């Protein structure tokens, strides 16, 4: 089978050759004409071949005589070749073998590759030579692959340091460890010594896989030398072997293809004719002028400019969305080559400019001053700037930004002049000094002549308001949280909150003797009453301190002051479980409410003096109670927790409203004397004004303090309110509430009083208006009280 | 029941299209898309709500207006670009196959597009085109100076040079240049054509540093558009002046670096219509590129034309000015006055007249001045500026051919020099002969007595001042006064450097009086005033207070009366007080010097006003407060910058009294006048 296939192949090759030869007559003739004199031999050869090709269409064997002739010629050529390359001496004798025999022998030589055969078929020279070579043993050429080299160590291609700590270097093919040789890896001294002793040391190489020295053979040394020289490692390889012309211009006797000449070779192309006619028609019609150069339309010199805007103007609307590119900014003085001296940047400014990122620089150039025009250098960023402009024009998104062209002053609201809203406190009148700690609280007595102040220094001081004189000092064993006068004018009763105790002290001398007597009588009357069990459970009422001994606590700290007319009289002590932070009186002075935020459900308690009753109005705690207040006219009760202000109707015992100032932490609360408006101060610096008729949301929220608001307060008579803050300021507002329900309250800031210093982040802790005068008093963390009139 | 509107089918989403979508829709490559955008003037937009447009995504994307892309869809250039793409493919194939004839044919039929329709489309009216000339001119003037490389084709450079020269010629003939400014980046020019201010920048004449990170393909696309635009604009401008476009180029001169003078402008109308203008008025024989016979003809024609034109031009200008005046005097006032008998018309007319005369004055600023430029002076810029304002200019042969007259011409009035030392008056020819050829240029040139030797900045300052500026300080070797930008209009709080305001005084005779040592003329008025003020202030104050005390007693009764009247009128007390204060100020203003005490009183009032303002700010809403603070911040930044400059100037003045001493001593020469002046001024202002 295989033999027949090769035969077919050969046949095909012969046909192909024949085809070549069919093409060749013209070429050969041409070459013959061209090199007539010079290469006569070739010319003869080709002319010989021409008729050959003609009749050798049918047979494989071809003409014998022709073949012979060829052989002779080739013999000569072969000899010449042999002269050049002596290696192929033995080939010459093979030439003698008769070419007639080759088809049969080729059939025998099946081992030869097909490519060889076809190549041989093309070139008669090679064909003959090849045929005579006795085929050597097949050498699969595994030389390049060193995998089959004799290695005793079978660990493979792994790092050798893995075996560093072992006594062996690897394993033999039997799986037995190969122990490290004694010679092993030598140190330098050993190496040197062996170099001296061993004659073969210079040609030995250490093999770390086998862990032994290998002595190179002579051949290997030669190879190394050649590699070092950059030559082929193999000495026998010849890089300059003669090229074998497998494909030549020579016409072969046996063509590779015997296909007949196709018809298209003889018939003029139809499609070419069509194409030509196309051009001809174009020329006839004048569309194409042969040889004429087409003028370039983009060439400006040939471009015909005309009056493009000549015709009637038709306004083209590019639409509302069209945004024209803004023009580039015109240069400023500092871009001048000779700017005024002040525009030239100093070294520091220049350094600052250079340190900035190019995109962040306000201007992309550094002003420079040149003495004269000739010293101005070229600007090296000119092209870059033009390019940037180009990029801006086509890549930069455009958007119309409306520039606010308004007078900023018009934004400021027009308020009535504060001068028209007089009276209000404007300046500092009196400073009360004496306290050594923060003054948490103070209170002005209902007559407006005296003031009691309680401080963190554990004292309560009584001041004559108009003279600023400290009349009396009471000392307690804890800091005073709150000091509040009973608002009733028929009593002179002072509530002092110290820790979990509320002291209700009668202060003789502040009011008239009848009033003092009435107060004492009230306290004595309460003392005679018995607490109900519910009251007793909530707090403990106790009568202490007879008129002779004013304060039992004061005795230990300092020498008690001599009993004067301002010394404390009878005292009633209410003791609670938890510390009380805030206390407030009802307008009539019979009720008071205390706040002790830690006491969960008992945080807010309401006490009635005349009946010695304590009530807990709330069954559940609604949150951390900050402040409580009685409504000035109605039976309402305000409870300010952290977030909300709840307003309870005490008569119907229901929640009336819940005010939501939408702030984080309420600090203080004040109710307008008429009762419909509430202000809430917060630790997050805001003041919220609620109009209870309007909404449960603030009518106005103001944020003007820089620190937390500590206290807010309404004036009982004048339309004034104030806020005190940790930033040391007291802001006084005109807050007019109209009786007409349709009119919104008028809020006008009238004065900012800057009086107190900030100590440890605390400024003004409390502020309160004088009950009758348009004055305000503030107490601060700096231990002073200040009266502004 | 309406149909349900799906998301993304209505509203902003449909108005915008991303770049990727646009490229896909147009079926072209991104490079071609960019090119098309440049040519058609399509630009990306910033949608108001990116999230809506991006269908929920706020990723940074480039959005185009959808209608813009639809507008590109029917663009002939788009088809041409596609053809070009196909052409490129065919060509590369032909080259790869080594089919040279095929390649040649293809190359001959390379698809090309014109931009005429785009120009018409983008600039529907001529004024639109003029409005958009800034970038175009700057670009063209840049490319005119660039060397031709593999990226910049030489034909583009040549075209740009030509277009620039043509445009400059128009500016010179129409006298429409208005402002010039020498900056560190280059020279800014501003011209006014048809009421449009066109500003462009020209680089200094150095070889340009070509950066590597500049994409010249983008630049050349822009250039393509701008070349066409300016070509059409030039055509229109020339045809409006009845000049043939394009003007011919005198090859000989052009090769001799004659610059602007190499262009031959010809009237498109018959000669006798008196409407011909030529750049070169003295009528040198000019030789045109054409054959010899034609050359001769042109020469003759040019000779005759030039002479005629020189006459005509002068006549015309005189005529123009007269005509303008005549018009103003005779024609226009009558109908207007007849139409409206009100008073307001008259001042506007006067203003218009004044403006017009000012303009003609500016246009003929250098009329009668004959300049000579030394070779170190930037010739093209100065030649353009001087001739654009009616001056004549000649130059050294070494800086180019085509100078209309030689250096020793007696008509020359100004010589522009930019050398370190003023030349000595008598250069001996022997000395020049004795020195070697190489040192010959270093020899001081002859100095002519009757000329003004000036530095180039003088020309530019004259233009910006709109009058012939005094030459003191501009002579060679002198320290030049600062050169200020004419484009700055100082705002309320901006810093205004010295000399930014026009120097007062009659400048007409400055030219003649320049040989008189030009000292004592430039009085730094501000400085004088400052000094005077500090002395006078206190005295005035005292006087004022005395006077006020006297007045008080007399006025008391009247005051009470006024209060009653105010109450009756329903004024609030504070308002009344304010009114009173202002009345007082006004009343006292009539007296000798009322300004200072009023100011002092105001400080108290101001403090109160400041407090009131502070209180009012408390009541502002959050939004308003934010806006207010933002505005104030911006203002403050500006003021800070101005204050910094002021401070810097003050320190500089203190630091170097010595260099200022020479002019300052002159300034302070008459100290008495310096004191009087502000007083007089105050009187006037009051």
Image: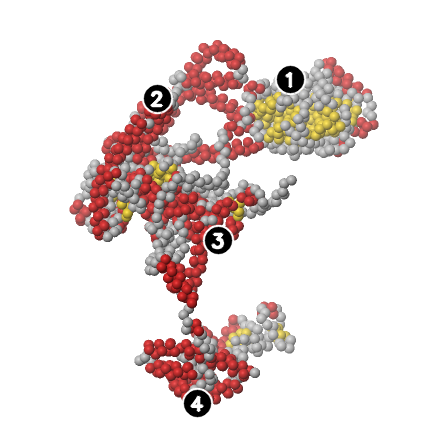
- Mark 1 against mark 4, which lies toward the viewer? 4
Specify few, some or many for label 2: CA neighbours under 10 Å numbering under 14, 14-19, or 20 or more: few
Pointer 3 and pointer 1 on the same chain: no
Disc number at residue B28?
A: 3
- Mark 2 against mark 4, which lies toward the viewer? 4
**Nearest the camera: B407 or B17?**
B17
Residue position for label 4: A96
Label 4, secondary structure: give it.
Answer: loop
In the rendered image, residue B30, in percent from the top left (x then y), is placed at 48, 52
Quadrant in the picture for the N terminus of chain A: bottom right
Residue B497 seen: yes
In the rendered image, residue A420, in percent from the top left (x then y), is placed at 56, 19
- Mark 3 against mark 1, which lies toward the viewer? 3
Residue at 49% in and 40% down: A321
Mark 3 vs 1: CB contact within 8 A = no
Q: What is the distance, in whole Å, between disc 2 and disc 4 at their CAs?
A: 136 Å
Judging from the image, mark 3 belongs to the subunit labelled B
Label 2, secondary structure: give it.
Answer: helix
**Nearest the camera: B677 or A165?**
B677
Pointer 3 and pointer 2 on the same chain: yes
Label 3, secondary structure: give it.
Answer: loop
Residue B529 seen: no
Q: What is the distance, in whole Å, between disc 3 and disc 1 at their CAs?
A: 87 Å
Residue position for label 2: B680
Residue A593: name its quadrant: top right
Mark 1 vs 2: CB contact within 8 A = no
Horizontally, is B575 left or right of A689 in the view?
Answer: left
Residue B114 vertical position relative to residue A742 in the rendered view, above or below:
below
Pointer 1 and pointer 2 on the same chain: no
Q: What is the distance, in whole Å, between disc 1 and disc 2 at their CAs?
A: 59 Å
Residue at 79% in and 24% down: A613
């Amino acid at each position: 089978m295989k033999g027949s296939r090769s035969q077919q192949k050969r046949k095909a090759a012969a046909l192909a050759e024949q085809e070549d030869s069919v093409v060749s007559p013209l070429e050969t003739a041409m070459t013959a004409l061209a090199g007539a004199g010079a290469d006569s031999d070739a010319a003869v050869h080709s002319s010989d071949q021409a008729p050959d090709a003609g009749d050798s269409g049918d047979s494989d064997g071809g003409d014998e005589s022709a073949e012979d002739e060829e052989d002779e010629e080739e013999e000569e050529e072969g000899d010449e070749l042999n002269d050049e390359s002596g290696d192929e001496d033995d080939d010459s004798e093979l030439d003698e073998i008769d070419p007639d025999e080759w088809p049969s022998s080729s059939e025998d030589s099946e081992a030869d590759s097909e490519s060889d055969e076809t190549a041989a078929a093309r070139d008669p020279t090679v064909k003959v030579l090849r045929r005579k070579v006795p085929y050597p043993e097949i050498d699969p050429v595994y030389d390049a692959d060193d995998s089959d080299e004799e290695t005793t160590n079978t660990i493979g291609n792994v790092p050798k340091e893995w075996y560093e700590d072992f006594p062996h270097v690897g394993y033999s093919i039997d799986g037995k460890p190969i122990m490290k040789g004694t010679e092993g890896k030598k140190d330098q001294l050993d190496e040197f010594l062996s170099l001296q002793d061993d004659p073969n040391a210079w040609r030995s190489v250490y093999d770390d896989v086998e862990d032994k020295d290998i002595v190179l053979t002579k051949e290997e040394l030669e190879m190394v030398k050649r590699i070092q020289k950059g030559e082929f490692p193999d000495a026998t390889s010849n890089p300059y072997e003669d090229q074998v012309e497998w494909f030549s211009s020579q016409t072969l006797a046996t063509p590779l293809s015997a296909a007949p000449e196709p018809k298209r070779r003889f018939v003029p192309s139809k499609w070419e004719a069509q194409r030509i006619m196309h051009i001809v028609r174009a020329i006839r019609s004048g569309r194409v002028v042969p040889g004429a150069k087409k003028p370039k339309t983009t060439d400006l010199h040939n471009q015909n400019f005309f009056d493009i805007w000549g015709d009637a103007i038709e306004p083209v609307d590019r639409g509302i969305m069209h945004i024209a590119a803004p023009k580039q900014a015109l240069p400023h003085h500092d871009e001048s080559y000779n700017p005024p001296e002040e525009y030239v940047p100093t070294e520091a400014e220049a350094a600052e400019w250079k340190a900035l990122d190019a995109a962040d620089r306000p201007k992309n150039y550094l002003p420079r001053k040149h003495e004269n025009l000739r010293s101005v250098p070229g600007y090296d960023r000119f092209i870059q700037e033009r390019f940037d402009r180009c990029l801006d024009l086509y890549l930069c998104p455009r958007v119309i930004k409306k520039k606010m062209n308004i007078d900023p002053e018009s934004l400021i609201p027009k308020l009535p002049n504060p001068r028209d809203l007089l009276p209000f406190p404007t300046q500092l009148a009196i400073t009360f000094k004496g306290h050594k700690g923060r003054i948490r609280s103070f209170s002005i007595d209902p007559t407006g002549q005296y003031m009691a102040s309680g401080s963190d220094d554990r004292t309560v001081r009584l001041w004559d308001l108009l003279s600023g004189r400290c009349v009396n000092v009471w000392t307690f064993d804890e800091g005073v949280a709150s000091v509040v006068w009973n608002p009733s004018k028929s009593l002179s009763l002072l509530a002092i909150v110290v820790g979990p105790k509320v002291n209700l002290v009668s202060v003789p001398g502040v009011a008239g003797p009848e009033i003092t007597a009435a107060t004492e009588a009230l306290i004595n009357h309460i003392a005679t009453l018995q607490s109900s069990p519910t009251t007793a459970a909530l707090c403990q009422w106790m009568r202490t301190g007879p008129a002779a001994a004013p304060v039992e606590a004061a005795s230990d700290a300092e020498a008690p002051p001599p009993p004067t007319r301002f010394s404390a009289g009878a005292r009633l002590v209410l003791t609670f479980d938890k510390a009380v932070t805030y206390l407030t009186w009802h307008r009539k002075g019979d009720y008071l409410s205390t706040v002790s935020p830690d006491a969960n459900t008992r945080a807010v308690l309401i006490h009635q003096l005349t009946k010695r009753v304590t009530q807990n109005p709330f069954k559940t705690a609604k949150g951390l109670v900050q402040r409580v207040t009685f409504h000035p006219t109605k039976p309402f009760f305000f409870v300010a927790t952290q977030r909300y202000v709840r307003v309870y109707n005490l008569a119907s015992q229901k929640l009336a409203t819940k005010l939501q100032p939408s702030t984080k932490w309420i600090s203080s609360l004040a109710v307008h004397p008429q009762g419909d408006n509430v202000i809430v101060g917060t630790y997050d610096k805001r003041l919220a004004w609620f109009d209870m008729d309007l909404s449960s949301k603030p009518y106005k929220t103001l944020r003007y303090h820089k620190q937390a608001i500590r206290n807010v307060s309404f004036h009982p008579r004048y339309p004034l309110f104030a806020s005190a803050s940790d930033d040391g300021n007291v802001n006084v507002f005109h807050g007019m509430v109209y009786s007409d329900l349709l009119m919104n309250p008028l809020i006008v800031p009238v004065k900012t009083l800057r009086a107190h210093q900030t100590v440890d982040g605390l400024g003004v802790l409390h502020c309160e208006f004088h009950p009758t005068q348009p004055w305000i008093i503030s107490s601060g963390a700096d231990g002073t009280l200040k009266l502004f009139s | 029941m309406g149909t349900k509107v799906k998301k993304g089918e209505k509203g902003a989403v449909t108005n915008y299209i991303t770049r990727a979508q646009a490229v896909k829709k147009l079926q072209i490559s991104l490079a071609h898309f960019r090119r098309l955008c440049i040519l058609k003037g399509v630009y990306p937009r910033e949608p108001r709500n990116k999230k809506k447009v991006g269908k929920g995504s706020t990723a940074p994307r480039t959005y185009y207006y959808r209608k813009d892309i639809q507008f590109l869809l029917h663009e002939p250039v788009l088809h041409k670009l596609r053809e070009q793409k196909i052409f490129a493919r065919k060509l590369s194939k032909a080259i790869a196959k080594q089919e040279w004839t095929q390649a040649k044919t293809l190359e001959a039929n390379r698809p090309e597009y014109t931009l005429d329709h785009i120009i018409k489309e983008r600039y529907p009216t001529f004024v639109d085109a003029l409005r958009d000339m800034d970038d175009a001119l700057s670009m063209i003037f840049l490319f005119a100076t660039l060397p031709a490389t593999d990226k910049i084709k030489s034909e583009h450079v040549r075209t740009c040079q030509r277009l620039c020269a043509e445009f400059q010629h128009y500016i010179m003939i129409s006298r429409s240049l208005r402002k010039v400014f020498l900056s560190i980046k280059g020279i800014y020019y501003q011209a006014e054509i048809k009421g449009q201010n066109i500003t462009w920048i020209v680089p200094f004449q150095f070889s340009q540093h070509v950066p590597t990170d500049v994409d010249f393909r983008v630049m050349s696309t822009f250039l393509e558009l701008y070349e066409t635009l300016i070509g059409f604009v030039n055509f229109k401008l020339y045809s409006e002046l009845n000049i043939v476009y394009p003007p011919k180029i005198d090859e000989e001169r052009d090769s001799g670096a004659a610059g602007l003078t190499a262009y031959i402008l010809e009237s498109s109308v018959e000669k006798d219509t008196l409407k011909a203008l030529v750049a070169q008025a003295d009528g040198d024989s000019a030789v045109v590129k054409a054959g010899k016979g034609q050359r001769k003809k042109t020469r003759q024609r040019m000779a005759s034309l030039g002479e005629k034109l020189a006459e005509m031009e002068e006549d015309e200008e005189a005529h123009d000015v007269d005509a303008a005046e005549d018009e103003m005097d005779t024609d226009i006032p009558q109908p207007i006055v007849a139409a409206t008998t009100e008073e307001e018309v008259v001042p506007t007319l006067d203003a218009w007249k004044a403006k017009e005369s000012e303009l003609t004055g500016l246009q003929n600023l250098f009329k009668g001045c004959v300049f000579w430029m030394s070779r170190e002076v930037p010739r093209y810029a100065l030649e353009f500026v001087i001739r654009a304002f009616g001056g004549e200019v000649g130059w050294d042969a070494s800086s180019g051919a085509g100078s209309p007259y030689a250096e020793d011409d007696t008509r020359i009035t100004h010589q522009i020099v930019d050398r370190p030392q003023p030349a000595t008056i008598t250069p001996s020819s022997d000395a020049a002969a004795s020195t070697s050829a190489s040192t010959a240029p270093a020899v001081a040139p002859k100095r002519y007595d009757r000329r003004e030797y000036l530095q180039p900045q003088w020309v530019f300052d004259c233009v910006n001042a709109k009058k012939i500026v005094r030459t003191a300080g501009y002579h060679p070797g002198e320290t030049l006064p600062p050169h200020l930008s004419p484009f700055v209009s100082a705002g309320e709080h901006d810093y205004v450097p010295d000399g930014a305001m026009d120097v007062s005084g009659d400048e007409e005779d400055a030219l003649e009086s320049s040989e008189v040592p030009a000292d004592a003329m430039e009085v730094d008025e501000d400085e004088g005033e400052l000094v005077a003020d500090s002395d006078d202030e206190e005295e005035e104050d005292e006087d004022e207070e005395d006077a006020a005390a006297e007045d008080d007693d007399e006025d008391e009764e009247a005051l009470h009366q006024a209060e009653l009247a105010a109450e009756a009128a329903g004024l609030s007390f504070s308002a009344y007080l304010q009114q009173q204060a202002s009345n007082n100020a006004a009343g006292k203003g009539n007296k000798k010097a009322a300004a200072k005490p009023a100011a002092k009183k105001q400080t108290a009032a101001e403090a109160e006003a400041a407090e009131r303002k502070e209180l009012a700010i408390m009541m502002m809403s959050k939004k308003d407060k934010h806006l207010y603070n933002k505005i104030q911040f911006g203002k403050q930044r500006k003021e800070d910058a101005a204050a910094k400059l002021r401070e810097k100037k003050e320190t500089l003045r203190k630091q170097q009294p010595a260099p200022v001493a020479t002019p300052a001593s002159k300034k302070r020469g008459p100290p008495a006048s310096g004191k009087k002046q502000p007083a007089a001024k105050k009187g006037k202002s009051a």
